[in-house]
Image: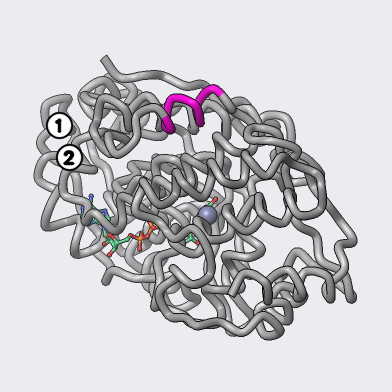
Amino acid sequence: GPDIIPVATATGAYDVIAGAGALEAAATRFQEMFPRGEAIIVTDTNVAGLHLDRVRGALRQVGIECEPVIAAPGEGQKSFSGIEALTDALAHAGVERGDTIIALGGGVVGDLTGFAAAIYKRGIGFVQMPTTLLAQADSSVGGKTGINTRAGKNMVGAFHPPRLVVADAAFLDTLPKRELRAGYAEILKAALIGDAALFDRLEAAGDGIYTPETLQPALTSAIRFKAGVVARDEKEAGERALLNLGHTFGHAFEAEAPGQMTHGEAVAAGLALAFRYSAQRGDCPQADADRVAAHLRTAGLPDGPDAVPGGPFDAARLVDRMRHDKKNSGGTITLVLARSIGDAFIAPGMDANDIERFLKSQM
Ligand code: NAD
Ligand code: ZN
């Protein structure tokens, strides 16, 4: 049956049910969460067309009728107007304090619905039903919710943990291969930060990584890893910043060519760069950096800047983006670097000029 991964943080404790049959395994939990026998499901048009009927059917089996609220797909929904439309829809549907709503979709639906749940009537419950690999491996766990503003991505939000996460394997059957690879980059990230044994298994699986037999246990390991990190450091006072491995570089690519690459493609190149830079500085064996790059190629992901869609990129402009990343200030840059595969560390105060020289050498 599916795996059950407990997550315990200061703001809430919940389970992640992951794998084949997760939806059915969650049914009894739903009966407690929806005592009135009604549930609002927030989703987007893509996911509604593919998975809403099955989810409604599973809930109907346990006596719960669902009313869908269906948004347009895409990052644009994570906006003040998106949150306004959603909270209006919740009011229109008569959602009350103490109620719980369901977010069925990728990270966009999860972040938007979670933030709506955080602020609607000063806070209601929500269930994450992540349907992309990225959302199952990363965004549905950890309690971060929010929207984008003119000032940048995820600028406004709240920590609002879900009451339950249902990561059903069958959702992934309809996911485009490019989105699957994007989510895989976050699984790989978890392995590279702190689970060397997971990396060894993925490396050994070679191009079999996308088969359910390999992917599902890897996903569970990645969720377990993130659950541990957020349990120890929910509000990112320290350790949680390790989850930014590959992301300072990755966000710079995304900012330079918005919409041209998936987040996972940008992060993949960022992971390769973080290991190569670590090796160049003498922090990490070159052999580890080479293994990371080789595995990224096997996974069909970029292993450096030249493989990122939307390039070529300019080193000085990338460093400028990195300097203005919301997690950086002043002339220095905080990077996540590595001592080896599975042993990342936070490196504050990195010299921007040195990073620029390194990036130039990688173009
Ligand atoms: P997404 O939600 O936009 O989904 C990608 C596309 O796949 C969409 O078009 C969607 O409609 C479609 N889709 C979803 N499920 C599908 C399925 N099962 N079959 C076919 N198509 C499907 O993007 P995403 O990659 O899931 O999430 C990205 C978002 O997550 C970003 O906004 C990012 O900021 C956020 N995020 C949040 C956190 C966090 O901790 N809260 C962490 C990482 C990322
Ligand atoms: Zn990410």
Q: Residue at x 51, y 50 (%)?
A: 293
Q: Amino acid at mark 2?
A: Val
* Mark 1 residue crowding within 10 angstroms, few (<14) / some (14–19) / many (20+): some
Q: Which is nearer the eye, 50 or 118?
A: 50
Question: Is residue 200 a member of the stretch shown in magenta?
Answer: yes
Left or right side of 241 for 310: left
Q: Is residue 171 left or right of residue 116?
A: left
Quadrant of the image for the C terminus?
A: bottom right
Q: Is residue 214 visible to us here? A: yes
The image quadrant where one finds the N terminus is top left
- Dividing the image into four equal quarters, which quarter contains ligand 1? bottom left
- 110 or 86: nearer the viewer: 110
Look at the numbered discs 1 and 2 and tell me whether their residues touch, using CB distance below 8 Å: yes
Q: Secondary structure at mark 2?
A: helix
**Residue 120 appearing in the image:** no
- Report the predominant secondary structure element of the magenta stretch: helix
Q: Position of residue 342 (x, y in %)?
A: 64, 32
**Image spot of residue 331 (x, y percent):** 89, 75
> Vertical placement of 250 versus 136: above or below?
below
According to the picture, the residue beneath numbered tag 1 turns out to be 58
Q: Residues in magenta? A: 197-203
Please tell me the numbered disc located at residue 55: 2
As measured in the structure, the alpha-carbon distance from the residue carrying label 1 to the one carrying label 2 is 5 Å
Where is residue 65 shown, x and y percent of the image? 16, 40
